[in-house]
Each structure stands twice: as structure tokens, then as C-alpha cells.
Amino acid sequence: MTAVAERIFKDALELLPVERAELIEKLFQSFDDAALNTVDAAWAEEVESRFEAYDRGEIKASSAEDVFARINQR
């Protein structure tokens, strides 16, 4: 890492956690990768579709405990 990047990193560590998170998000968005935007849009659509299916009673929710238990059984 360059000296400038090191200084910026050191300064960033002095920010509040929420400010660091916002900075991370802005830096991530600065890459402006069209593929990432496409993936984000697809996930947003999928999430909305699942919420709607849940509201219509087509799918049921599971508790976090049940989900983790199923994962741990694998």
C-alpha cells in the first residue's frame, strides 16, 4: 500500500464504526461494476418475490434455530 493509502487507512480507523461502514460502501460503489449491479438487482427481485410468496401463504418461514440446525446436520 502506498504512503497515501496508509495515511487514509489510519485516518479512517479514527472514524465511528457507522462512518467507516458508510466509507466502505462508497468505496465499494466506486468500482461501479455493471456485473455487480446486475447481481444486486437480481437478488433484490428474488427477495421481493419471496416476500410476496410468503405474504400469499405459498411459502413458510423457518426460525433461525431451525435453519442453523439443518445447516449443522450437513
Image (tube, helix red, strand yellow):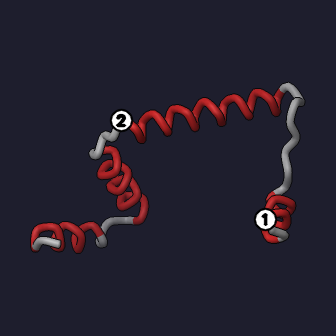
Horizontal and vertical percent position of residue 60: 88, 40
Q: How many marks?
A: 2
Horizontal and vertical percent position of residue 42: 55, 33
Can you identify the residue that label 2 sits on? 34
13 or 3, which is in the foreground? 3
23 or 14, which is in the foreground? 23
Q: Amino acid at mark 2?
A: Ala
The quarter of the image holding the C terminus is bottom right
Left or right? Give the position of 32 relative to 44: left
Q: Secondary structure at mark 1?
A: helix
Q: Earlier in the sequence, mark 1 or mark 2?
A: 2
Q: CA distance from mark 1 to mark 2?
A: 32 Å
- Which residue is at a point 84% across and 67% down the rendered structure image? 69
Horizontal and vertical percent position of residue 14: 29, 71
- Which residue is at a point 42% across and 41% down the rendered structure image? 36
Left or right? Give the position of 34 relative to 46: left
Which mark, by number, is residue 40? none
Q: Tell me the crowding category of disc 1: few under 14, some 14 to 19, or many 20 or more residues within 10 angstroms, Cα based.
A: few
- Please say if the residues under marks 1 and 2 sit with CB atoms less than 8 Å apart: no
Q: Secondary structure at mark 2?
A: helix
The quarter of the image holding the N terminus is bottom left
Tell which residue pokes out farthest to the left in this image.
3
11 or 39, which is in the foreground? 39
Horizontal and vertical percent position of residue 56: 85, 25
- Which residue is at a point 80% across and 70% down the rendered structure image? 72
Left or right? Give the position of 52 relative to 27: right
Q: Tell me the crowding category of disc 2: few under 14, some 14 to 19, or many 20 or more residues within 10 angstroms, Cα based.
A: few
Q: Amino acid at mark 1?
A: Ile
Which mark, by number, is residue 71? 1
